Structures are given as structure tokens and as C-alpha cells.
Image (tube, rainbow, N blue to C red):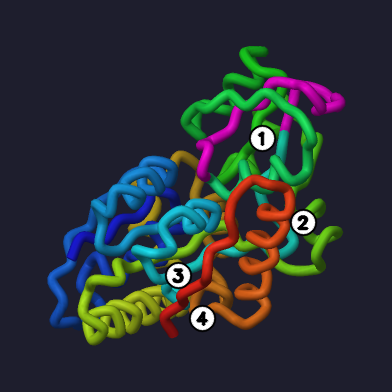
Amino acid sequence: MIVAHTPDVDDAFMFYAMTVGKIPTRLKIEHFIEDIETLNKMAFECMLDVTALSVHAYAYISDKYKILSSGSSVGDGYGPIVVSRENIDLEGKSIAIPGRFTTANLILKLALDKFKPVEMKFDEILDAVRRGVVDAGLVIHEGQITFESYGLVKVLDLWEFWNDLTGLPLPLGVNVIRKHIPREDQGEFLRVMRESVVYALENVDEALDYAMRYSRIERNVARRFALMYVNEYTVEMPPKVLRAIEKLFEIAEERGILKKPKLDVLF
């Protein structure tokens, strides 16, 4: 079974126990690591058995994958932001985005009527904004914490936009599993995923030691970021997160951005 996730601190943190064999299982798991937009596009081609996925991308593969109720990344009080060199009006401006199919990009499209997207790797965005290559940048991952060190300011907080609009947490990422995989194997992987998340939360320093081998940031910042996105929502998706996913797709369909998929979630 090919299991794909990103090298980001939060993913490395939650997958740690599974990766190093802390969770016994009969499944033969092969880990594959890439950035989230690459994984989104690989999932479109059904190249992965299990993968981390942007919630946005699920709209295009709901016929092939189920959402796992464990392993999701949800913002509640924080989320992607748009930064610039100074406080500017973003309408019509060039904004670096970390991928067309990222959930952050979908939320940005809901928040702004018109902007010029410039796709680039997420870890290149802050420097591109600082150098004036683009007017602003849509920041995900640890850049949400570190942007000020680049001399940049927050212009738009997408969690605040989403919360004002819906009153719900912001669902950003999920883990999904191919529907063709036998049901008993789907259930077994879900158990392993959940226990891996629980192990990380119960053994934070140990899991963080592992995650730091992928980190681009200092340990104290990495710890803060990991615990922002690996939390009680990650252990088991509650009803309000399901409502948030449904609402995201409903609004996006109303705006003519995509067709709302039927959610298929494995509990």
C-alpha cells in the first residue's frame, strides 16, 4: 500500500509512529513524500492508495477516493494568510499561490473577486513577495508564523474571512483512501492512522524529534506549528468539520467554481 504525505512538520509529526513501526499492522505500507500540490495532481491520476489531499482537490476525485475520518488538518483560530510588503488593496493584484488545487487558493477565490494568480512552490512565496516578484503571496504551512521575519505584513486572514462567513472551522487538508481497496484493509489503515496521531499527541517530543529532520524552521516554531494542525480534529473528524466541508463546497458551487461532490467518509 503506497501511503503519501508531505514532508511538512505537521504531516511528519502525525505519521511518525506509523512510519517507524510503533503501530503494529498486517498492512505493508510504503511511504511516499512530496509537496501537497504534487500529491493532489497524483491523486487525480489514481497513482496513490492513500494520500494527504487538499480538501479542494477532493471535489475532483470523490468518485475514486474516500475521506478518512482521522488525519485531517483544520484551522480553528488560524489558517492561510495573504502577505505583502505593505498593507495594500488586493483586488486585481498579482498573488503567488501554492497550487491551483490547494484549499487556500479556493478560499482566496471566495474572498476576492479578482486577482492575478501566480503559481509557485509554497516555500518560494515569501521570498518572491519580499523581492517584489509579485504584489502579495498566499501563505500556507509554517509561513503563517514566520512571514514577519521576511519584513512582510498580513493583509488578509482567510480563517477570519471564513469564520465570519460561516462560523465554522476551516477544513484545509484530509487523508483519503482508494475505494477499490478492500473494505477490511481500509478499516485497518484507518485504525493505524488514528493510533499514529494519538501516539504523536501523547509523545510530542519524540514525534517532533522525527519531524525535525524535515523541518525548515526552529524547533520551538515547529512544535507550535505541528500542534496547531495536529489536534482533536485530526484524531477524529467531528460533525462540525463535516459541515464545514459541505459548506465550503456549497459556496464554491454557488460561485460557479466547482461542482459540489458527494462526501464519502470512512469512520
- Residue 98 among magenta residues: yes
- Residue 110 among magenta residues: no
3D distance between C-alphas at marks 3 and 2? 21 Å
The amino acid type of the residue labelled 1 equals Phe
- Other residues around mark 2 within 10 Å, as few (<14) / some (14–19) / many (≥20): many
Task: Say which label, 3 or 4, has the lower sequence index.
Answer: 3
Of discs 4 and 2, which sits in the foreground?
Answer: 2
Q: Is residue 208 visible?
A: no
Range of magenta residues: 83-101
User: In the picture shown, does residue 77 fall above or below 85?
Assistant: below
Residue visible at 50% across and 67% down in the picture: 72
3D distance between C-alphas at marks 1 and 3? 26 Å
Residue highlighted by disc 2? 162
Residue 1 percent coordinates (x, y): 18, 66
Residue highlighted by disc 3? 71
Of discs 3 and 2, which sits in the foreground?
Answer: 2
Left or right of 56: which side holds 115? right
Residue visible at 21% across and 80% down in the picture: 182
Q: Secondary structure at mark 1?
A: helix
The amino acid type of the residue labelled 3 equals Gly
3D distance between C-alphas at marks 4 and 1? 31 Å
Q: Secondary structure at mark 4?
A: loop
Quadrant hosting residue 38: top left
3D distance between C-alphas at marks 2 and 1? 21 Å
Task: Say which label, 4 or 1, has the lower sequence index.
Answer: 1
Residue highlighted by disc 1? 147
